[in-house]
Image (spheres, grey):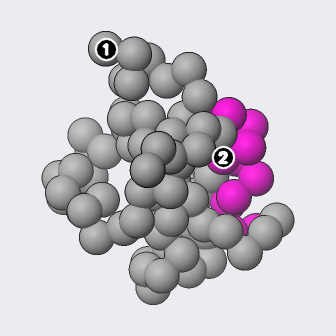
Amino acid sequence: MQLPEYTLQQLALRNGQDRDEVWVAYKGVIYDVRKSRLWRSGNHYEHWAGQDLTEELKDAPHTAYVFDKFEAIGLVKNSVYLSK
């Protein structure tokens, strides 16, 4: 099954504030983090849902394996990470 593509503007709407969806992107893949108690309000420490967190992950106390806990629900349209 191929995942649907979303623009960064569409991702931004899924910030846990404007809608019930709480999505974040990492390396061009969009994850639904709504089930995480840490993302419930749309933010996780100084990070906000509805954004691409690729660059911010290098400052996090965990690795990218954290995304293995979440369902990949889409791809960022025209992502430089997916065109490689």
The quadrant in which residue 76 appears is top right
* 55 up-or-down from 29: above or below: above
Q: Amino acid at mark 2?
A: Leu
Residue 49 is tagged as none
Identify the secondary structure beneath mark 1.
Answer: loop
Give coordinates of residue 59: x percent, y percent. 27, 44
Residue at x-position 48% and y-position 69%: 33
Secondary structure type for disc 2? helix
Looking at the picture, does residue 35 appear above or below residue 31? Answer: below
Per the rendered image, the range of residues in magenta is 7-17
Q: Nearer the viewer, residue 19 or 75?
A: 75
Say if the magenta span includes residue 10. yes
Q: What residue is disc 2 on?
A: 11
Most foreground residue, 17 or 78: 78
- For the image, the number of numbered tags is 2
Compare residues 34 and 84 and report the one nearer the observer.
Answer: 84
Residue 74 at x, y percent in the picture: 52, 48
Return the x and y of residue 45 as percentages of the image width and height: 45, 66
